[in-house]
Image: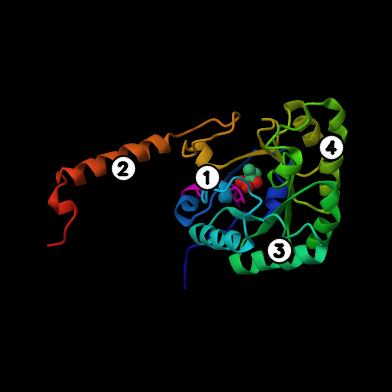
């Protein structure tokens, strides 16, 4: 019999209970090895559909297929032990009807063994969020700049620059919270609006390009590591992996071309 206490993952109710408490730490991750590193520090890890752009070179998240989310979701669950894993529902897999959303969310949860799903949209998705939560699927909501609607928004545009739009965003936040979402990503909105949203709901807000007063923060891992050639203005880079990889590849190429690499590092004897 094992004498070691099992490591328990962070749960949805534990994240929910952090409203107004210790800030929630989160990052995206798309594959097992980076997820294992992030797992040591994050309360939840999002397998975001940004993987379409970051990993697969797509121009937006609109083209991301469900199977791809499931494949990366499985890898992240395999690589982690502690964090709650949340998997994004990609565009076109939940908007049509609550039934369709349930079918696809259930597939994500069963095949990846993640702990929750995330979907974009405020008031218009409230009925679906309620339907999913009632049937055992925890939902993280996402409002403000919602990348899956970038074609309607005319690009990846900061929301709430016009104060007259604030009430609609606050109503979106209230609607998803009342529908049963356990947390709410608030992306790309002006700071005073983000603060109003945080004050308006009793679930944790997770800011990205929003406000440091949100109940938690999330960043795309590759952005904050300096691995992405195009990084949004609000992102602080905590590493310089892009240039570091370039330097390593250049050294390797030079050693191969000049046959300068030490034999013992490249051959079995
Ligand atoms: O897909 C993603 O990475 C996200 C975060 C930016 C919140 O939704």
Viewer-nearest of discs 1 and 4: 4
Residue 85 visible in the picture: yes
Residue 258, position as x, y percentages in the image: 16, 43
From mark 2 to mark 1, how far is it between C-alphas? 29 Å
From mark 1 to mark 4, how far is it between C-alphas? 31 Å
Color encoding of the figure: rainbow
**Residue in front for this viewpoint, 199 or 75:** 75
Choose the circle earlier in sequence order: 2 or 3: 3
User: Could you tell me which quadrant the C terminus lies in?
Assistant: bottom left
Relative to 123, is 70 on the left or the right?
A: left
Q: Mark 2 packing: few (<14 Cα in 10 Å), some, or many (20+)?
A: few
Q: Is residue 195 above or below residue 89?
A: above
Q: Which residue is mark 3?
A: 105
Q: Which residue is mark 1?
A: 41
Q: Is residue 168 above or below residue 88?
A: above
Choose the circle earlier in sequence order: 3 or 4: 3
Answer whether residue 40 is magenta in the image. yes
Say which residue appears at 50% left-offset and 47% top-offset.
38
Quarter of image, res 189: top right
Q: Which residue is mark 2?
A: 249
Quarter of the rendered image showing ligand 1:
top right
**Secondary structure of the residue carrying numbered label 4:** helix
Q: Are marks 1 and 4 in contact (CB under 8 Å)?
A: no
Q: Which residues are magenta?
A: 37-50
Say which residue appears at 46% left-offset and 48% top-offset.
37
**Residue in front for this viewpoint, 215 or 227:** 227
């Amino acid at each position: 019999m094992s004498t070691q206490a099992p490591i328990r993952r962070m749960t949805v109710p534990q994240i929910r209970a952090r409203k107004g408490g210790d800030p929630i730490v989160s990052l995206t991750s798309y594959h097992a090895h980076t997820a294992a590193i992030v797992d040591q520090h994050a309360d939840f890890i999002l397998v975001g559909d940004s993987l379409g752009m970051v990993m697969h070179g797509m121009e937006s998240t609109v083209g991301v297929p469900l199977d791809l989310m499931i494949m990366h979701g499985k890898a992240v669950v395999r690589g982690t032990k502690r964090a709650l894993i949340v998997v994004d529902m990609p565009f076109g897999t939940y908007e049509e009807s609550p039934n369709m959303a349930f079918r696809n969310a259930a597939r994500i949860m069963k095949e990846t063994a993640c702990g929750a799903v995330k979907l974009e949209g405020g008031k218009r998705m409230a009925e679906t969020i309620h339907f999913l939560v009632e049937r055992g699927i925890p939902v993280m909501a996402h409002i403000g700049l919602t990348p899956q609607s970038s074609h309607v928004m005319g690009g990846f545009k900061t929301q709430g620059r016009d104060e007259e739009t604030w009430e609609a965003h606050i109503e979106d936040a209230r609607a998803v919270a009342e529908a049963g979402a356990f947390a709410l990503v608030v992306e790309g909105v002006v700071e005073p609006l983000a603060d109003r949203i945080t004050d308006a709901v009793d679930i944790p807000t997770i800011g990205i390009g929003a406000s440091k007063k949100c109940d938690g923060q999330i960043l795309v891992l590759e952005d904050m590591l300096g691995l992405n050639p195009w990084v949004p203005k609000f992102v602080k880079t905590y590493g310089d992996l892009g240039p570091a990889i370039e330097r390593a590849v250049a050294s390797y190429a030079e050693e191969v071309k000049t046959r300068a690499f030490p034999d013992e590092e490249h051959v079995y004897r």
